[in-house]
Amino acid sequence: MENCIFCKIIAGEIPSPRLYEDDQMIVIRDIEPRAKLHYLCMPKVHFATLKEMDDARAEIVKHIFAVIPTLEKELGLEEGYRVVINQGTNGGQTVPHLHIHLLGGEVLGGF
Ligand code: 5GP
Ligand code: ZN
């Protein structure tokens, strides 16, 4: 997808170290962390919101959620973490490429 910053990261056009990568997804650090640890998990295929889900995309999202718990130790999230998916304007979504925030590394307040 042209002009999608996450597609550019996935394509390697914008450098961003990958903490995990497979054929369907990558995990990177958020550039503006909202917690001591803040990661972004994203599918390699471009779609913006859960509303655009179809069976193939649902399989990818399922895969991402299956991978996340296997990375807890490596990412320093063994003591727990928060999973956030912002959707659209009111949800505060700023990048229209579906992504799952993982926030942790400290006790999170304010929910
Ligand atoms: P959203 O607000 O759409 O839920 O989340 C987008 C997130 O992407 C924000 O937390 C923002 O800090 C992060 N972000 C935006 N541009 C970049 C970038 O170029 N690299 C990385 N690693 N994170 C980014
Ligand atoms: Zn994209």
Image: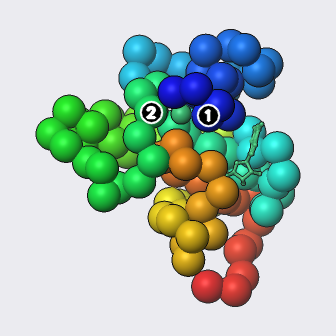
Label 1 lies in ligand 2 vicinity (Cβ under 8 Å): yes
Is residue 67 visible to the viewer in this orientation of the structure?
yes
Quadrant of the image containing the C terminus: bottom right
Helix, strand or loop at label 1? It is loop
Q: Identify residue type, mark 2.
A: His
- The alpha-carbon separation of the residues under discs 2 and 1 comes to 8 Å
Note whether 2 is above or below 29 in the view shown: above
Quarter location, residue 93: bottom right
Q: Residue at x 81, y 54 (%)?
A: 33
The disc at residue 4 is 1
Q: Secondary structure at mark 2?
A: loop
Q: Position of residue 67 (x, y in %)?
A: 41, 35
Label of residue 46 in the image: 2
Residue 34: percent from the left, percent from the top? 79, 62
- Percent across and percent down for residue 70 are 46, 36
Q: Residue furthest bottom?
A: 110
Tell me which label, 2 or 1, sits earlier in the chain. Answer: 1
Q: Residues within 10 Å of mark 2 (few under 14, many from 20)?
A: some
Front in this rendered view, residue 85 or 103: 85
**Callout count:** 2
Left or right: where 29 falls relative to 90: right
Q: Nearer the viewer, residue 52 or 15?
A: 52
Q: Quadrant of residue 109?
A: bottom right
Nearer to me, 52 or 22? 52
Give amino acid for label 1. Cys
Q: Is residue 24 left or right of residue 77?
A: left
Tell me, yes or no, whether the two marked residues, 2 and 1, touch with CB atoms within 8 Å.
yes
Residue at image position (56%, 77%) is 90
